Image: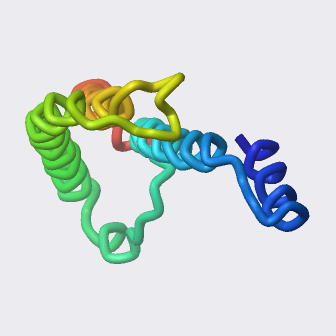
Amino acid sequence: MTLLVFFNAISRYLFSSSLILIDAFSRYSLIYIAFIGSAIALYEGAHIGVDYFLNLLPQNIINIIKKIHFLLIFFAGITMYTSTTNLISRGYNTYIDALMPFIANRGQVYSIFPISAFLYVLFSLGLFFYKNINKE
């Protein structure tokens, strides 16, 4: 993706035009990378967080707060999954001109939303039940 965007920037500078296919591909692949990456970051605990005030609390309160946090992510993932299935069904009637030979409709592009929502649900349940949150 990086090489394609670099090539497109060079062609835009040299030839005053760019390939629409590369723009669309890089845009949608960046969306895919961001949503899959955020689910993986949830699992690995790599999201940015401020835990100064949390560390002032006793460990048993910290564990309860973290369990509540994982439950909130679980319900947000369920909500995201149920709300985006309607978006996908409507997206199958909308076509992307630049990606017409490769991806026929927006429903295929929008499929990343329930996939990442499923990963949020799966990872939040795993962290809620199986992760030893006393050790970090």
Q: Name the residue at 47% across, 46% down.
A: 31
Q: Position of residue 33 (x, y in %)?
A: 53, 40
Front-most of residues 7 and 48: 7
Front-most of residues 59 and 2: 2
Q: Position of residue 114 (x, y in %)?
A: 25, 31
Can residue 38 be seen here? The reply is: yes
Question: Which quadrant of the view contains residue 89?
Answer: top left
Q: Position of residue 48 (x, y in %)?
A: 47, 62
Q: Name the residue at 61% across, 40% down.
A: 21
In the shown orientation, is residue 27 left or right of residue 135?
A: right
Indicate how the structure is coloured in the image: rainbow
State how many labels appear: 0
The quadrant in which the N terminus is found is top right
Q: Name the residue at 50% across, 34% down.
A: 99
Question: Which quadrant of the view contains residue 74?
Answer: top left
In the displayed image of the protein, which residue is found farthest to the right?
14
Can residue 119 be seen here? The reply is: no
Q: Position of residue 111 (x, y in %)?
A: 31, 29
Rendered position, 119 above or below 17: above
In the shown orientation, is residue 83 left or right of residue 31?
A: left
Q: Name the residue at 40% across, 75% down.
A: 52
